[in-house]
Amino acid sequence: MSPYALPASPPVPPGVVDRLRAAGCVFAEDEARLILRTARTPEEVETMVRRRVAGLPLEQVVGWAEFRGLRISLDPGVFVPRRRTEFLVSQAVAHATGRRSAAREGRAGAVVVDLCCGSGAVGAALVAALGPRTALYAADVDPAAVRCARRNVADVGGRVYEGDLFAALPAALRGRVDVLAANVPYVPSGAVGLLPSEARDHEPLVALDGGTDGLDVLRRVAADAREWLAPGGCVLVETSERQAARAALAFVRGGLTARLTTSEELDVTVVVGTAPAAPPGRVAPDSPAASVPPAAPEGRTHGYAAPPPPAPGSKSSTK
């Protein structure tokens, strides 16, 4: 079924469909209908068709993308949220829901951070799932993404900051974050040129290129995440299955317990790093009592834990 399937509508001008099909659009008729439903004038139809034929992602052409049932505003040059990233959101919701069930009565909603937020789709989806009491903070290094994200999270009271990873966030969030979703770039530098032209030519390189092995930004997030997480809080990062073991190791080295959850349907793996729980009898201010993160409702999981410290007098080495 086409990802842009729409209810019946008036016939689409054959010329529009032919132009889209000639440009390589597999779902040319559905895309044409979407353009016609979005454009307000014949001139806008022509402009959108020309931009789509030139290779711009359809979502940037029409100015929005659907993500977990939400209509996410998009500007040209802003990373388009992928359907596979909905799996990351489902993992985050499962964790937050488990923590909330163990929370004290009357506690405020979860503190959620959407790092490398792009359009803000992940943060907006998390608030939609967790409720309006959720406190949402988001950050991105790309000014265009920040402007776009601010529009998408304004209605839910989200705050968006411009800057490099954690440096962009208010210092007061340290030790208070329940869920940290970081949709970091994870395409190896040498593979960026192999991406579809829609991504390669029309999305920011900073949102795609993850360094030599694709894990440079992930390692930076993993190294600093524990400082920002509340006891029992978690950080979630999307990656590929072939990178997953190395990604989990980065989380363990950052002092977190790591587990992997994979969706074969969406061909994506999410690494979930969980901070140590508060000591027995103690609950961190503004944080729920610790609980074991529940397994997600779909996918398969594998856990990683930090190795035990070496016995006194033994020799050990790390690379």
Image (cartoon, grey):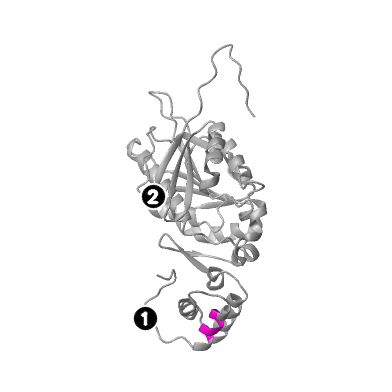
For badge 1, the amino acid type reads Ala
Residue 315, image x, y percentages:
61, 16
Residue 20 or 145: which is nearer the viewer?
A: 20
Q: Residue at x 53, y 30 (%)?
A: 255
Residue 59, image x, y percentages:
53, 68
Q: Residue 8, labelled with which disc?
A: 1
List the residue tagged with mark 2.
130
For residue 317, above or below residue 127: above
- Specify whether 282 is left or right of 143: left
CA neighbours of label 2 inside 10 A, class few (<14), some (14 to 19), many (20+): some
Q: Is residue 131 visible?
A: no
CA neighbours of label 1 inside 10 A, class few (<14), some (14 to 19), many (20+): few
Q: Residue at x 38, y 53 (%)?
A: 129
Q: Is residue 294 visible?
A: yes
Residue 73 or 30: which is nearer the viewer?
A: 30
Residue 306, image x, y percentages:
50, 28
Residue 66, image x, y percentages:
45, 64
Disc nearest the viewer among 1 and 2: 1
Q: How many marks?
A: 2
Q: Report the Cα–Cα distance between label 1 and label 2.
A: 34 Å
